[in-house]
Image: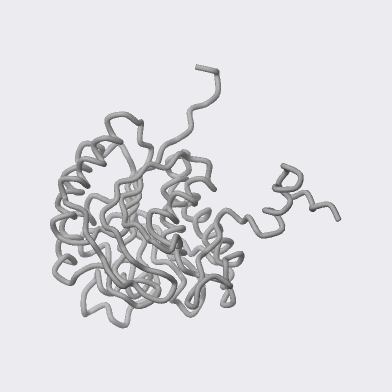
């Protein structure tokens, strides 16, 4: 040992985005931004870009479980983020594998159901498995408003804010963050125990939002691994996701461009290439 503090480890259980904007790719970048080491268990391969998801190939459930076990037996996992899970069989495998980590390790569940492009990423027959098997195992679930209404059922179609968060809890969740991207005001609502916390933020309508939900949930998991309280971790995640949208790559792809959580722009890249130092202007 060199006397340096050990870097926290986060595990992302999610799908791969061939366009690099969301999923595993977004999670690893957000983990790096937060100063934790990212490990992965890939649940599905997707052929997608900023416009559409054209094909999804689920990973065999046994392989998903094997990835989780390989990470958990070698690394001291500080937090888990769950994103796209593909289908009911994979959900069952993930739930079983998680039991080796619970309740010691906090779990952040981002119930990925619909892509930014509108494509469905979770089959309807898998929604019941997600509610029954993953919601109760998650420390906190982070749906946007449409996802929260699906989780809570048809009676929640008109609910918002704290009422919607309570409706999600009523079907088996523990703590809940309803993210503000689809709300009239860009305010996240955290239901932690009996307390409701509003986490306001700035909306960036001209930013690039592909991967913003993944970035939020993985940043939240990273801060839990770093030892932050849930409220402080949720505040940090809200700020990081908004910043990633603000500095997103609007000029990449024909659809919603990918977020830029690392904040490295073209000028920074040229500066590094010419001087070896981030943020130093390139010589004239």
- Residue 185: x and y in percent read 51, 76
Q: Is residue 169 left or right of residue 33?
A: left
Residue sitting at 19 percent across and 66 percent down? 127
Q: Is residue 272 left or right of residue 51?
A: right
Q: Is residue 64 left or right of residue 71?
A: left
Q: Which picture quadrant has residue 206?
A: bottom right
- Residue 178: x and y in percent read 39, 66
Residue sitting at 65 percent across and 59 percent down? 265
Residue 283 showing in the rendered view: yes
| Near-viewer residue (274 or 8) | 274
Find the residue positioned furthest to the bottom: 158
Residue sitting at 51 percent across and 63 percent down? 199
Residue sitting at 33 percent across and 66 percent down? 47
Q: Which picture quadrant has residue 44?
A: bottom left
Find the residue positioned furthest to the right: 284
- Residue 261: x and y in percent read 55, 57
Query: Which image quarter is the C terminus in?
Result: bottom right
| Near-viewer residue (108 or 86) | 86
Instruction: Please give the count of numbered marks on the rendered protein.
Output: 0
Residue 131 showing in the rendered view: no
Image: 200 above or below 60: below
Q: How is the structure coloured here? A: one colour
| Near-viewer residue (177 or 267) | 267
Q: Which picture quadrant has residue 277?
A: top right
- Residue 102: x and y in percent read 25, 39
């Amino acid at each position: 040992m060199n006397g340096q503090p050990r870097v926290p480890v986060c595990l992302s259980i999610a799908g791969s985005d061939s366009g690099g904007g969301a999923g595993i790719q977004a999670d690893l970048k957000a983990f790096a931004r937060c100063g934790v080491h990212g490990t992965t268990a890939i649940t599905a391969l997707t052929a997608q870009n900023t416009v559409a998801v054209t094909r999804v190939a689920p990973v065999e459930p046994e392989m998903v479980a094997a990835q989780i076990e390989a990470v958990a037996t070698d690394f001291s996992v500080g937090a888990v983020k769950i994103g796209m899970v593909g289908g009911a069989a994979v959900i069952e495998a993930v739930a079983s594998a998680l039991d080796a980590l619970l309740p010691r390790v906090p779990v952040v569940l981002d119930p990925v159901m619909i892509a930014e492009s509108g494509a469905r990423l979770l089959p309807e027959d898998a929604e019941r498995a997600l509610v029954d098997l993953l919601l109760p195992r998650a420390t906190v679930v982070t749906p946007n408003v449409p996802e929260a209404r699906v989780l809570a059922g048809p009676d929640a179609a008109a609910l918002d804010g704290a009422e919607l968060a309570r409706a999600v809890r009523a079907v088996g969740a523990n703590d809940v963050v309803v993210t503000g991207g689809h709300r009239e005001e860009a305010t996240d609502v955290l239901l932690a125990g009996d307390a409701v916390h509003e986490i306001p933020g700035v909306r960036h309508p001209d930013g690039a939002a592909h991967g913003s939900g993944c970035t939020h949930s993985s940043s939240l998991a990273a801060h839990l691994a770093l030892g932050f309280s849930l409220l402080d971790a949720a505040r940090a995640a809200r700020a990081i996701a908004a910043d990633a949208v603000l500095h997103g790559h609007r000029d990449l792809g024909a659809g919603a461009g990918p977020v830029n959580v690392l904040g490295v722009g073209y000028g920074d890249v040229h500066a590094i290439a010419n001087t070896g130092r981030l943020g130093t202007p390139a010589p004239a």
